[in-house]
Amino acid sequence: MSSTTTRRRVAAASLAGLAVFAAGCRGGSEDPGDGGGEGGIATDVGVTSEACPEAVNPDNGCIYLGTLSDLTVGPFAAAGPTIVAGQEAFWARVNEAGGIGGYDVDVSEYVRDNQYNPQVTNQVYQEIKPDILGLAQTLGSPPTASIVEDLAAEDIVAAPAGWTSLYLFQDVILESGPTYCAEAMNGVDYAAETYSAESVMAVHYAGDYGGDAAAGASVAAEANGLEFANVETTAGTDNQSAAVAAIVDQAPDVVVVSTGPADMATIVGQSVAAGFQGRFLGSSPTWNVALLQSPAAPALTAAYQLLGPWGPWDTETPGHEAMREAAGDTTPNEFFLSGWVWSYPMKAALEAAAENGDLTRAGLAEASAALESVDYEGILPEGSGNYANGGDAAAVRTTQLSDVSADASTGVTVAEADLEGSTAEGYEFTGPCYEEVDLG
């Protein structure tokens, strides 16, 4: 099976047939669950009539969702635990409101460290697969790509911690917010209009994170008549000297950076120190409030802006307010907010599956495939979460552009809300950007 299957192309009758096929393929190697769930809801793997550990509602059954996150050594190891904390706060709120269909949702029992490594991801995924209904989090596009064919074969629905445009075309992936591709398009359009930029450089990790952002930057550069340069880099703060040299030597007007936070800070800090006077636009994963305590903080304040999928921590929406209340004394962090937001579509899919009386894996997959919108409580635009009508319809095209500000709770504050340039507005997503655009 291709990892870029066309989203939502299977009719309801075909889904029913696939559900029977998938159930037969699972055989007896996995715990089939209770078979009959609460209130007559059908269940199979990862759903029990017994209460969750430390259940909020001891009379409820339990839905187990797994988590695969970068918790120790990968480029997002500083982010992973905070994302996990955000999703745990989200599901605690759901359970405190009574749960879903007579079940609490557990996202703590099956948390595993994927080290942002595809091989490790597949290993720990296989360890927890027999015990989970779906994945509350799978962090990183290359790690997620290593398991997505198995996810599809097993009808295991997953919420990704990432924004690659590949997710628009994968039926079991419930993505949230604009892609790296659309985000970069909006950033370049903004730079052309606001800074009169005539040249743009993409500095990025290889693959479907950095490559996706670079593809968007390339498309927008062409649309605006800008010169475009493409520079790949590898993770690690000691590995950024070539990227810095390219920036300083070529002196583009704007640089779109798509790396981890520490690498971004190294690139910006060293480039500015070497005399670079252009602007930096960072993809969603590049910011961490801890960077305000780094030596790069002055350079970041002067030259860097964040391309975010939604408003930062201090934004006033019902969803942000609920998140801040649930966070309590937690130190504000954009990755906590991300863990919260990424959980909304899984909640919607579980509610729809329970309403359908089918909390089996196939039932959850069918319910998620039928979602035409998700209520993000104002965090994302109305109509977001349209997984039923193809990849182009699923694509969110607005970006929140933020400045670095020491006065903001997470160090960033919105400078341009709901930014949607003409490039992203008019772009048709027919496949993953990094596969469709030749970066040379």
Image: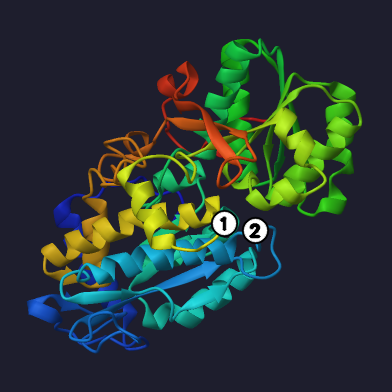
Left or right, 181 with reference to 353: right
Q: Position of residue 28 (x, y in %)?
A: 32, 88
Mark 2 or mark 1, earlier in chain: 2
Structure colour scheme? rainbow
What residue appears at the point 47 percent right and 43 percent down from the top-left corner?
314
Q: Nearer the viewer, residue 296 or 248?
A: 296
Q: Nearer the viewer, residue 268 or 160?
A: 268
Q: Position of residue 275 (x, y in %)?
A: 90, 26
Q: Quadrant of residue 340?
A: bottom left
Under mark 1, the amino acid is Gly
User: In the displayed structure, would residue 152 be above or below residue 426?
Assistant: below
The local secondary structure at tag 1 comes to: loop
What residue appears at the point 39 percent right and 36 percent down from the top-left corner?
395
The local secondary structure at tag 2 comes to: loop
User: In the displayed structure, would residue 206 be above or below residue 153?
Assistant: above
Quarter that holds the N terminus: bottom left
Left or right, 212 with reference to 303: left
The residue pinned by badge 2 equals: 76
The residue pinned by badge 1 equals: 140
Under mark 2, the amino acid is Phe
Quarter that holds the C terminus: top right
Q: Quadrant of residue 135?
A: bottom left
What residue appears at the point 57 percent right and 70 percent down from the top-left corner?
121
Q: Position of residue 430 (x, y in %)?
A: 42, 33
Q: Quadrant of residue 9?
A: top left
Q: Which mark is residue 98?
A: none
Q: Position of residue 246 (x, y in %)?
A: 86, 31
Residue 173 visible from this viewpoint = no
Dot 2 surroundings within 10 Å: few (below 14), some, or many (20 or more)? many
Q: Are marks 2 and 1 in contact (CB under 8 Å)?
A: yes
Q: Nearer the viewer, residue 91 or 238?
A: 91
User: In the displayed structure, would residue 187 be above or below residue 313?
Assistant: above
